[in-house]
Image: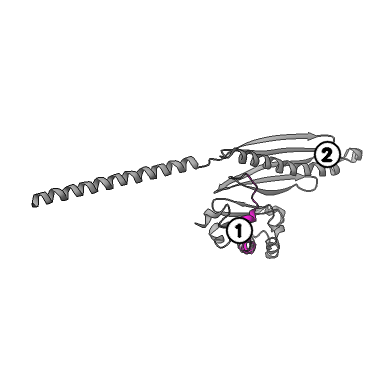
Amino acid sequence: MRKIFTIALILVILAAGIFLAIEYLDQIKSIAGSLASRQIDQIVISKENITEKEVNKADNYTTEVTYPVFSGIRDSQAKEDINAHIKSSVFAVAESFKNDARENCDFSKLGDNAPDWTCEFYALPEAYNVIDRILSVRMEYYRFTGGAHGATNYVYLNYNLSTGKPVEWNSVFKSDSEYLKKISDFSRDYLIANITKGDNAMTNEEWVKEGTEPKSDNYNTNVGFNDFGIIILFQQYQVAAYAAGPQEVTIPYPEFKDFIDPAGPLSAKLN
């Protein structure tokens, strides 16, 4: 009797072991399938730069416009919309320069008193980042229409990779939150600590306070995103003199845990 019981117990243990082994193998398959799916779902964005030049001797200006064309975006319509919007946005800036140049750079009527320089415009995609569902592109624009030096400014173009639609930078936050004050406070404190102190000071606190005030004019098109946080790129003259150049502040995402919209394209940063 004891022998039968022992055999039965062994059979039960073996059955349980086989059952657990099957369950384990199923879990391994499930995990492997999940990982494979994630690899398939990964979006690998790449870009190609296209340059178009124009030399207009009649109106005395030159333009060199370089714009990015992105591939690797899963939705073909979203890819088409993003690339079309980037191109139209960049050329809109170039066209604005041309209109100014036609009025201010034609020196043909000045005769011997005409300046010997040409008005110039350059557009260049400086950087881009992919953060969750957002493609964030930083464009650099340079224009020279006379004077001691030209002027450079930076514009962020942000897009939803799922829809292809532009993402207004402030739309990633809860509309009723004080996200602008948070950005202002953090940027002001960071810049005062880093560019107004010591032997390397390049500006003063009043200039920084004015340029970082929590108003939309200070944060219109100069806000982008990277893996670590929200980028604020203060333009030349905004918080310091021309010689100091633009000033960049990156505010880590955890600083915005109470402000990010959980239904928005940055919702993954809440985890």
Amino acid type at mark 1: Phe
Q: Secondary structure at mark 2?
A: loop
Q: What span is colored magenta in the figure?
A: 164-186
Residue 15: x and y in percent read 22, 46
In the depicted view, which residue is nearer to us: 231 or 28? Answer: 28
First-in-chain label (2 vs 1):
2
Q: Mark 2 against mark 1, which lies toward the viewer?
A: 1
259 in relation to 28, above or below: below
User: How far apart are labels 2 and 1 at the CA level?
Assistant: 50 Å
Labelled disc at residue 116: 2
Residue displayed at 46% across by 43% down: 38
**Residue 189 lies in magenta, yes or no?**
no
5 in relation to 188, above or below: above
Residue 192: x and y in percent read 63, 63
119 in relation to 236, above or below: above
Residue beneath disc 1: 173
Residue displayed at 58% across by 61% down: 259
Color scheme of the displayed model: one colour
